[in-house]
Image (tube, rainbow, N blue to C red):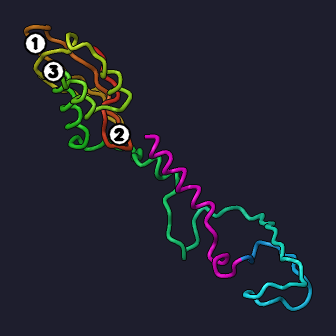
Amino acid sequence: MPAAAAAVLFAAGAWLLAPTAADLLTPGLSATSSTTAPAGPAPARDEPAADQPPVTTTSTSTRAPSSAPPSDQPQQPTPAAIETAPTDTGEAPPEQQWRPVAEGFAADFAAPGEDWAQRLAAWTTPELAQAYAYTDPNRQPSADLAELEIHEEGPTSVRVLATYTSVVDGDFAIDLRVLLTLDGWRVSSAAPA
């Protein structure tokens, strides 16, 4: 995630600092700068003038940056568009988008083993994956997933109840929250129900 944030900041900085087309066509001069130059004919650009002081350029631009780059420059995505890739459309997402993540997590949650935390990390947010990283193997549940029941469904968040049957641990259920993130759908929390 820090790499994505750095990329967003870099793209925004590059866009804000990029010269306009007019600046590229006439180096040192632009429509929004004032120039102090010596009176008389200007020396050729290839030959330095030995008896004239150097040209000093001071920018006095007061125009506000445009919300869109000029049409002759390639359009860059805005930082806001990058950071908010998952959008709230007001409609519940199709179940086939988030259900494989919920089912995969629910099945791996009740299948103990040495790679338990690694398997769960494939379905979770980095924060939840870190919470499971040091779980005592003796505390890993062993059960069969019986059912996934939708409790809440929104455009970027779904809450489901995973119900398990187990001869050893007894029947139990966990409440899962599945969120739409920049990395796709991920389980962000799992709590006993």
Residue drawn at x 18%, y 22% as measured from the top left: 114
Q: Amino acid at mark 2?
A: Leu
Disc with the residue nearer the chain's start (3 vs 2) = 3
Q: Give the quadrant of residue 28.
A: bottom right
Total labels: the figure holds 3
Q: Residue furthest front?
A: 50
Q: Among all residues in the image, which is located at the extreme left?
A: 167
Residue 40's spot in the image, x, y percent?
90, 90
Q: Earlier in the sequence, mark 3 or mark 1?
A: 3
Mark 2 or mark 1: name the one nearer the start of the chain.
1
Q: Residue at x 54, y 53 (%)?
A: 10
Q: Which residue is at 38% across, 28% downward? A: 127
Mark 2, Cα crowd under 10 Å, few <14 / some 14-19 / many 20+, is: many
**As drawn, is 154 to the left or to the right of 137?**
right
The amino acid at mark 1 is: Ser
Q: Which residue is mark 3?
A: 113
Q: Position of residue 55 (x, y in %)?
A: 83, 77
- What residue is rendered at 54% in x and 73% in y? 73
Front of the two marks 3 and 1: 3
Mark 2, residue position: 180
**What's the CA distance linking mark 3 and mark 1?**
16 Å
Res. 166 mark: 1
Comparing 148 with 74, the one in front is 74
Magenta part of the chain: 1-27
> Residue flagged by tag 3: what amino acid is it?
Gly
Q: CA gap, disc 3 to disc 2?
A: 28 Å
Is residue 180 something one can see in this rendering?
yes
Helix, strand or loop status at disc 1:
loop
Marks 3,2: beta carbons within 8 A: no
Q: Nearer the viewer, residue 49 or 100?
A: 49
Task: Provide the major secondary structure of the magenta segment.
Answer: helix
